[in-house]
Image (cartoon, rainbow, N blue to C red):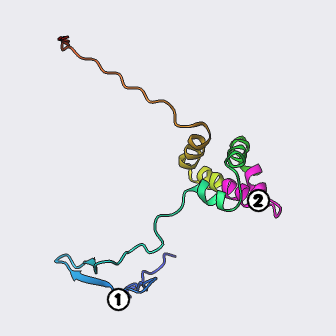
Amino acid sequence: MPRKKSTEPKVIKPKADTSHIERIPQKHGGALLKMTKGMTMNPNGRPRKYTTAMREQGYRLVEIHDCIQVMLQMNLAELGEVYKNENATILEKTIAGSLRKSLEKGSLYSIETLLSRVYGKPRETVDVQSEEKITITLGK
């Protein structure tokens, strides 16, 4: 039996103090949010990079790379065991969870990110062909 759609409008509660935001209504029914000078919509700033967050937990870069290399060789069942293991470190759980979620979604984003973190980005080449002549003049 299909679910009935609610006719009540959704009420979205703000996560933080919004007194410094001015709502400017638009013709289409939406609204622009205008900030007062000196205020920000993102008070916590940009999220920290993965390795920076792990370093704050006390891990060295070599340990992070070694863990990534080992986990990239595991199958889905092994990653699940690592994630559920009570004795696994936060680094192991984070990498296992990320890889498992990517595999279940069919996405290669996490794998690509982890590979480029350990081995570096692959070299990109550009093939340029031109019919124009190049003239080089050497002067005194």
Give the residue type that dot 1 points to.
Ser
Residue 23 on the magenta span: no
Residue 7 spot, x, y in % from top left? 37, 86
The residue that mark 1 highlights is 19
| Nearer-the-camera pick, 38 or 49 | 38
Q: How many dots with numbers?
A: 2
Eyeballing the image, is 130 above or below 76? above
Q: Please name the residue shown 28% across and 81% down the image.
A: 36
Q: Residue 89 bears which disc, if any?
A: 2
Residue 92 on the magenta span: yes
| Residue 129 falls in image quadrant | top left
| Residue 111 falls in image quadrant | top right
Eyeballing the image, is 97 above or below 125? below
Q: Please name the residue shown 42% across and 84% down the image.
A: 14
Q: Please name the residue shown 69% across and 62% down the image.
A: 57
Q: Main secondary structure of the magenta part?
A: helix
**Neighbours of disc 1 within 10 Å: few (<14), some (14-19), many (20+):** few
* Range of residues picked out in magenta: 78-97
Q: In the shown orientation, is residue 17 left or right of residue 93?
A: left
